[in-house]
Image: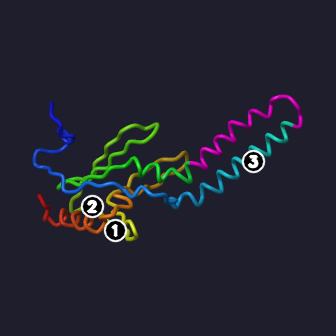
Amino acid sequence: MSTDPWEGLLDADEQILWQGRPHDGFALHPNALVMIPFSLFFGGFSVVWMLGAAQGGGYFWTFGLLFFFVGAGMLIWAIAGDTIRRRGSYYSLSNKRAFVATNLPFQGKRLKSYRIDEETNLEFRDGDYPSVIFAKEVHRGKKSTYEVDIGFERIAEGRKVFSLMRGLQNGEAET
């Protein structure tokens, strides 16, 4: 039995050039600026509703607990969700593809790969922990679709990885 975790996942002429993980410190995702007020309103409204329902006597007010806990869960995820997602993420770059592996609660282990070639649109986002964006995924909501950036987020070696990817695009892959 082989101990190579990449066995069966890489092409015969494919080699890993870089591996890393995102910075796992706490950081709010920009979407949290919308979700935090919404979840506070949602949970707060359920508390007001439960107080009003309790005035009538009986246990009818307990139906509001479901909405309260949904609001509390939305608040917790808005604050900590991005950090939890990053702590369960692992990144690899080969001479052909970028890999994003995740191991998240309630989702389990997942591995996605994205081809890196001259057609790939690369975006470098500078900062204390830079990000390299290399793909977009379309997600569908009930009434609309929206794009989600895919990349190596908040990595310490952002400039090095961006340079490696640019080299892959130009046919200068390290092996």
Q: Quadrant of the N terminus?
A: top left
Q: Residue at x 65, y 57 (%)?
A: 37
- At x 64%, y 45%, the residue is 72
Density class for disc 2 (Cα within 10 Å; few <14, some 14-19, many ≥20) is some
* Magenta stretch holds residue 8: no
Residue lying furthest front in this view?
25
Circle 3 or circle 2, nearest the eye = 3
Query: Residue 118: horizontal and vertical position, in percent?
Result: 21, 63
* Residue 80 badge: none
* Nearer to us: label 2 or label 1: 1
Span shown in magenta:
55-76
**Circle 1: element type:** strand
Q: Residues within 10 Å of mark 1 (few under 14, many from 20)?
A: some
Find residue 113 and report its horizontal and vertical position in percent.
Answer: 28, 48
> Type of residue at label 3?
Phe
- Expressed as whole percent of the image width and height from the top left, the position of residue 86 reads 41, 52
Q: Is residue 52 left or right of residue 123?
A: right
Q: Mark 2 — residue? A: 120
Residue position for label 1: 124
Instruction: Report whether 17 appears left or right of 34.
Output: left
The numbered mark, 3 or 2, whose residue comes first in the sequence reads 3
Secondary-structure class at tag 3: helix
Tell me the residue that label 3 is attached to: 45
Q: CA distance from mark 2 to mark 1?
A: 13 Å
